[in-house]
Each structure stands twice: as C-alpha cells, then as structure tokens.
C-alpha cells in the first residue's frame, strides 16, 4: 500500500488531530508554517515550544508528524513514545509509534503499538490495516487475514473505503494455504474496486484480466511502481515460481519507495526466505 498518493499511512499521519486546544503561540505559528509547507521552520517552532514545556501535546504531535514525514523514524518513535508515556490512551500516538517502529523494521514493537491503538480506538480501519501489515511482515498470515477483515469492516463503518486490506487478506490466505477465503477476498475486491483509480489495476492483475507488463504500464509514480512489483512478486510466489518472484521482491527491497508498506513487506519476506535457506 502506497504512502504517496496519499496512501493510507501518509493520510493517517497527516490527519492526526489534537484533542486539546492549542494554547502556545509558538505552536499556533508552527501549525500555520506547516500548512504553508515550511516544515523546517515549523519543526523549529515546535522545538522552541517543547523547550518551554516538554509535555506540550500539540507540539509533540506536530514534531512527530514532521519527523515521520522526513523519514527520521528513530526520532519520530522517540517523540511518539514520550506522548504515550504522558497520554497512554492517545490512539493516534500509539499508531504513530507503531508506524515508526514498522519503518525501522522492529515488528514486535510495531505489533504491540498497533494493538494498543486498536484497543483505544477500535472503529478505525487504518489502525487494523496497520496491524495486518505488520502481521504479514512477521509471517503471521492467519492473524494478518483476521486483522485485514476487521479493517475492511471498520472502514465501512465509518463510510470509508480502502482496497488494501482486501489485498492483504488475499495474499495472507494464500500464504496460509486457504484458497477458498483467498478467492472470496479477491471476488470482494473485484466487486468493490475503485473506479479508474489505483490500485484497481492491481486487482485486475490478480484476477487475470491483465498481465504483469500491463500492470506496470498503469504505474504513475514510485509508490505505485513499488506496489506493482510487490504484488507481482507475491502472485508469482503463491504460484510457486520462486525465482521470478524473488527478482521482483528484491527489486522492491533495493529500489522501492521507502514510504510504502509494501517496501518493508518485500524486505521482510526476502529476509524470511534467506533465513529459511540457512536452516538445514
């Protein structure tokens, strides 16, 4: 799933809301600068506000958002971690903590963070989708399928739509050798795919309506290219063509857009396969 058009991950980061009214003039100015696209100066203002009050939730959230966007994941994690230490029921901060850990490939910490986010705010499709992605990376495919199904339900409850949980469920079921549920997930995706919008071509490719080269032809940016190669690799992997699958997944692991979930998944699967080869 992409973190670029906007993807669910980037959308979630950019829509973190502050439940406490902004009080510090520095923080107010920082958010105005952020809206104007001056993230560097906004970050400076947030830091000044935190120098005055290290527990300012609005400043911490703003700082974390920018650090995550800059892919400074260790610093973003530390900021989110400080938020949940002071506000242990802040669901968005737990999810942000999980995203930072996920991007650092610390899947155990990401898992516990996403579980906490869903516990604090269960009617949130993206939180469950995040949980499904990390379960895929951990090789816990049955758990990934369950989380993906809940994600779809929660998106629907809020009148939202995302095809990505259906893609996760499809491949999770395939990995778990549950062909019946895998096909059911794909059929549901076909009935509910976005009209003339990404990732509709991915769903068509999985259904056999178009071939891999045609899917690549629909790509418009690095995020979609990363997704396309990942899903081609996953399909080839499910078909038992490990060598061809490896080429696509290795391309993603080496050249993919780091801002998408699929990049990290490809890296995780490559590592799992490499470790499997070392086991006698």
Image (cartoon, helix red, strand yellow):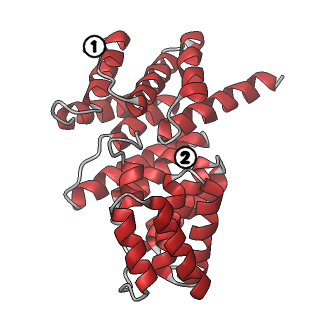
Mark 1 or mark 2: whose residue is earlier in sequence: 2
Residue located beneath label 2 in the image: 135
Horizontal side, residue 164 vs residue 76: left or right: left
Q: Looking at the image, which residue is at 49% across and 36% down?
A: 262
Nearest the eye: 15 or 144: 15
Packing grade of label 1 (10 A; few <14, some 14-19, many >=20) is some
The tag on residue 247 is none
Image height check: is 209 above or below 135? above
At which x and y percent is residue 154?
30, 58
Horizontal side, residue 138 vs residue 11: left or right: right
At which x and y percent is residue 64?
52, 65
Q: Looking at the image, which residue is at 44% across and 32% down?
A: 171
Tag 2 secondary structure: helix
Horizontal side, residue 276 vs residue 253: left or right: right
Tag 1 secondary structure: loop
Where does the N terminus fall, quadrant-wise?
A: top left
Instruction: Work out how far the residue at label 1 is from the one at label 2, CA to CA, in angstroms.
Output: 29 Å
Disc 1, disc 2: CB below 8 Å? no
At which x and y percent is residue 79?
59, 69
At which x and y percent is residue 125?
34, 56
Nearest the eye: 88 or 184: 88
Residue located beneath label 1 in the image: 210
Circle 1 or circle 2, nearest the eye: 1
Q: Quadrant of residue 224?
A: top left
Q: Looking at the image, which residue is at 57% across and 80% down?
A: 50
Q: Quadrant of residue 30?
A: bottom left
Packing grade of label 2 (10 A; few <14, some 14-19, many >=20) is many
Image height check: is 5 above or below 237? below
């Amino acid at each position: 799933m992409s973190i670029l058009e906007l993807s669910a991950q980037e959308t979630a980061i950019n829509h973190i809301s502050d439940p406490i009214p902004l009080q510090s003039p520095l923080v107010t100015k920082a958010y105005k600068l952020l809206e104007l696209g001056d993230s560097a100066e906004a970050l400076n203002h947030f830091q000044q506000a935190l120098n005055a009050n290290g527990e300012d939730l609005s400043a911490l959230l703003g700082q974390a958002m920018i650090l995550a966007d800059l892919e400074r994941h260790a610093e973003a994690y530390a900021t989110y971690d400080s938020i949940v230490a002071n506000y242990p029921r802040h669901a968005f901060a737990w999810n942000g903590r999980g995203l930072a850990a996920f991007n650092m490939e610390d899947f155990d910490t990401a898992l516990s963070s996403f579980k906490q986010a869903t516990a604090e705010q269960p009617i949130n499709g993206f939180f469950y989708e995040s949980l499904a992605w990390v379960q895929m990376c951990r090789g816990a495919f049955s758990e990934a399928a369950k989380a993906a199904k809940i994600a779809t339900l929660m998106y629907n409850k809020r009148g939202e739509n995302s095809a990505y949980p259906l893609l996760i469920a499809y491949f999770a079921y395939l990995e778990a050798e549950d062909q019946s549920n895998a096909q059911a997930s794909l059929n549901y995706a076909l009935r509910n795919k976005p009209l003339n919008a990404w990732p509709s071509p991915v769903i068509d490719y999985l259904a056999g309506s178009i071939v891999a080269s045609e899917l690549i032809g629909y790509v418009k940016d690095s995020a979609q290219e990363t997704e396309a190669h990942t899903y081609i690799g996953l399909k080839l992997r499910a078909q038992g063509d490990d060598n061809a699958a490896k080429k696509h997944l290795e391309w993603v692991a080496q050249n993919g857009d780091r801002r998408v979930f699929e990049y990290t998944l490809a890296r995780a699967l490559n590592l799992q396969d490499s470790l499997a080869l070392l086991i006698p």
